[in-house]
Image (cartoon, rainbow, N blue to C red):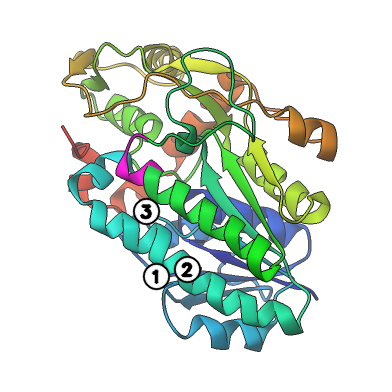
Amino acid sequence: MKKLIVTGGLGFIGSNLIELLLKKNFYVINLDKVSYSSNFYNVREFEKSKNYKFLKCDIGDKKIKKILFKYKPVGIFNLAAETHVDRSIDNPKNFIQSNFVSVFNLLENFKEFSKRYKSKLIHISTDEVYGDILSGRSSENYPYKPSSPYAASKAASDHLVSSYVRTYKIPAIVTNCSNNYGPKQHPEKLIPKLIYNIMNDKNLPIYGKGKNSREWIYVKDHCEALYKVFTKGKVSEFYNIGSNKNLNNLQVTKSIINVAKNKIKLGKKIKINFIKDRPGHDIRYALNSNKIKKKLGWIAKTNFRHGIKVTFEWYSQNKNYYKSISKRDILKRLGI
């Protein structure tokens, strides 16, 4: 059975990706350093599978080399990263360490490993590297212009991966995805935060006037795209992954409220609360994903209304998920 490594597999996207890869009959090794956003609840459905193994490991650790040569994976999906913009504003050092320095260590060890064994590295990144896209959509050739320390750390790691491809000929691909939502997402992020507050009769905090626009993609669509890139993608290429559908934060909030009305009785305290905006808050992100559509035949299948319905149902049926997370992370968004 062929083996794959997923880094950051206790997180949101990583755990959903592992679920897909196990269904594709791969043996999956989950490497995670177990940080605040890691959650063993995310892997409870398959943690006893004979085709799944968890190893506590930071991709910045020296032991990553030993793991690569022991398990000889045919592919690595690098999802290990600090991802919350507010946290990067409060403490950028952690983001530079996790998202850039640790990626350097992974690349150094993968460089040696890939000389002896056939493998492929999929480095997963974000649409935030492009910065504000006030009109139109950013293609893979669009210049990077990151606004936050988080986006800058991801942009730097993207460039580093690209440099190793060109200089050392490592077999790697970079993907840039739009805003994900769905089951198992940490409640510091907008959608699970709003769902938690609705279920607990709390007000709904929205930055600024709620006009910041994002391109929302259901996490399982993203995972299917990553698998397509792994199996069909061309080494050295960049692929944008998006839904081609934008909504601003106010529209997202109203959509969740509308779904909730049909599921639960809404409390009296549930109302939109506009709060002081985040420093350097980008107005709009929007990807042009024509390349992955034309070259690899992938397209997002889940419309936002259905995706939000499924997402709300998951959180309402998995209330223990919230209990497994620090109350501070649930009740307060950093940067406020």
Residue at the image point whose x is 68% and y is 48% from the top? 226
Quick one: 258 or 85, which is closer to the camera?
85
- Magenta-colored span: 147-151
Q: Earlier in the sequence, mark 1 or mark 3?
A: 1
- Which secondary structure, mark 2? helix
Quarter of the rendering occupied by the N terminus: bottom right
Residue 121 quadrant: bottom right
Residue at numbered disc 1:
33
Q: Depth-wise, is mark 3 or mark 2 nearer the camera?
A: 2
Q: Main secondary structure of the magenta part?
A: helix
| CB within 8 Å, label 1 to label 2 | no
Q: Earlier in the sequence, mark 3 or mark 2?
A: 3
Residue 309, position in %: x, y? 53, 24
Q: Amino acid at mark 1?
A: Lys
Q: In this view of the protein, can residue 219 be seen by the observer?
A: yes
Quick one: 51 or 157, which is closer to the camera?
157
Q: Amino acid at mark 3?
A: Glu
Q: Amino acid at mark 2?
A: Phe
- Which secondary structure, mark 1? loop
Residue 81, position in %: x, y? 42, 56
Mark 1 burial class by Cα count in 10 Å: few <14, some 14-19, many 20+: some
Residue 223 part of the magenta-drawn span: no
Residue at the image point whose x is 44% and y is 84% from the top? 62
Mark 3 burial class by Cα count in 10 Å: few <14, some 14-19, many 20+: many
Q: Is residue 40 left or right of residue 221?
A: left
Quarter of the rendering occupied by the C terminus: top left
Residue at numbered disc 2:
104
Residue at numbered disc 3:
82
